Image (tube, grey):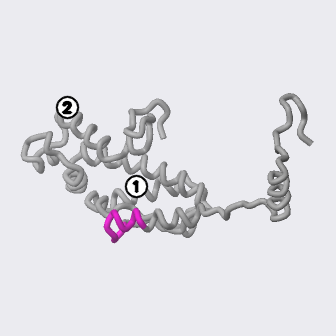
């Protein structure tokens, strides 16, 4: 997502997870608190910045904490950009976001939708819906993995039967099948 962005736990840099995932959001809010912001989230954490959790950040953003709202909006922008790329590649009819993001309120969903509609091909977004999921995370991941498996399923390519039989006969006679020597052109 961002060339030369922050390190990601996958080993790469600037990945969506590294810039908009829970750990990235928590790092940003810790910095905002150190700079004097995030009073609402700090109150939810009992005054201890180390106790700030993701749901506290989302709740504080919804309650009007300016630092949390700005951080969540930035994460929503990055999420929207990432989803727009997926929409352009796969043209889905529905995108389902983790239900836990509802804690930030409708504003987060509206921001994601705005970015996806701005960045994705208009044809792809014409009849597409983006919504919060109603299933548990495990159910969504399971359903998603099944859908991806089916979508990318490629029938096994097998050589024609006559080739298999011919090659089988050659190998039984002891004939070696070799690659052409280096430098020669294959016909």
Magenta segment includes 137 = yes
Which residue carries the number 2 mark? 35
- Residue sitting at x 25%, y 46%: 68
Quadrant hosting residue 178: top right
Which residue carries the number 1 mark? 111
Residue 64 percent coordinates (x, y): 22, 52
Residue sitting at the far right: 187
Q: Which residues are magenta?
A: 133-142
Residue 185 percent coordinates (x, y): 90, 35
Q: Secondary structure at mark 1?
A: helix
Q: Which corner quadrant holds the C terminus?
A: top right
- Residue sitting at x 45%, y 59%: 113
- Residue sitting at x 24%, y 40%: 29
- Relative to residue 69, is residue 158 drawn left or right? right
Residue 128 percent coordinates (x, y): 52, 67
Magenta segment includes 63 = no
Quadrant hosting residue 135: bottom left
Q: Nearer the viewer, residue 112 or 17?
A: 17
Q: Nearer the viewer, residue 24 or 128?
A: 24
Above or below — where is 40 with respect to 162?
above
Q: Nearer the viewer, residue 120 or 140?
A: 140
Q: Are marks 1 and 2 in contact (CB under 8 Å)?
A: no
- Disc 2 crowd, CA 10 A, few/some/many (<14, 14-19, 20+): few
Q: Secondary structure at mark 2?
A: loop
- Disc 1 crowd, CA 10 A, few/some/many (<14, 14-19, 20+): some
- Secondary structure mostly seen in magenta is helix
Q: Could you give the CA–CA distance between mark 1 and mark 2, rounded to whole angstroms?
A: 26 Å
- Relative to residue 91, is residue 115 drawn left or right? left
Q: Nearer the viewer, residue 145 or 2?
A: 145
Above or below — where is 23 with respect to 120?
above
């Amino acid at each position: 997502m961002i060339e030369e962005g922050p390190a990601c736990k996958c080993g790469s840099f600037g990945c969506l997870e590294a810039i908009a995932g829970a750990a990235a959001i928590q790092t940003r809010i810790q910095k905002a608190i150190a700079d004097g912001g995030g009073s609402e989230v700090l109150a939810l954490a009992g005054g201890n910045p180390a106790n700030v959790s993701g749901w506290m950040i989302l709740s504080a953003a919804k309650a009007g904490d300016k630092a949390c709202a700005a951080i969540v909006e930035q994460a929503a922008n990055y999420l929207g950009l990432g989803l727009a790329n997926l929409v352009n590649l796969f043209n889905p009819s529905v995108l389902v976001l983790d239900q836990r993001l509802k804690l930030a309120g409708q504003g987060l969903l509206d921001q994601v939708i705005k970015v996806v509609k701005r960045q994705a091909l208009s044809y792809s977004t014409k009849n597409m819906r983006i919504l919060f999921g109603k299933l548990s995370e495990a159910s969504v991941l399971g359903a998603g993995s099944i859908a991806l498996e089916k979508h990318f399923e490629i029938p096994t390519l097998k050589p024609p039967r006559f080739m298999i039989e011919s090659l089988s006969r050659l190998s039984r006679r002891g004939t070696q099948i070799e690659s052409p020597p280096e430098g020669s052109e294959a016909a």
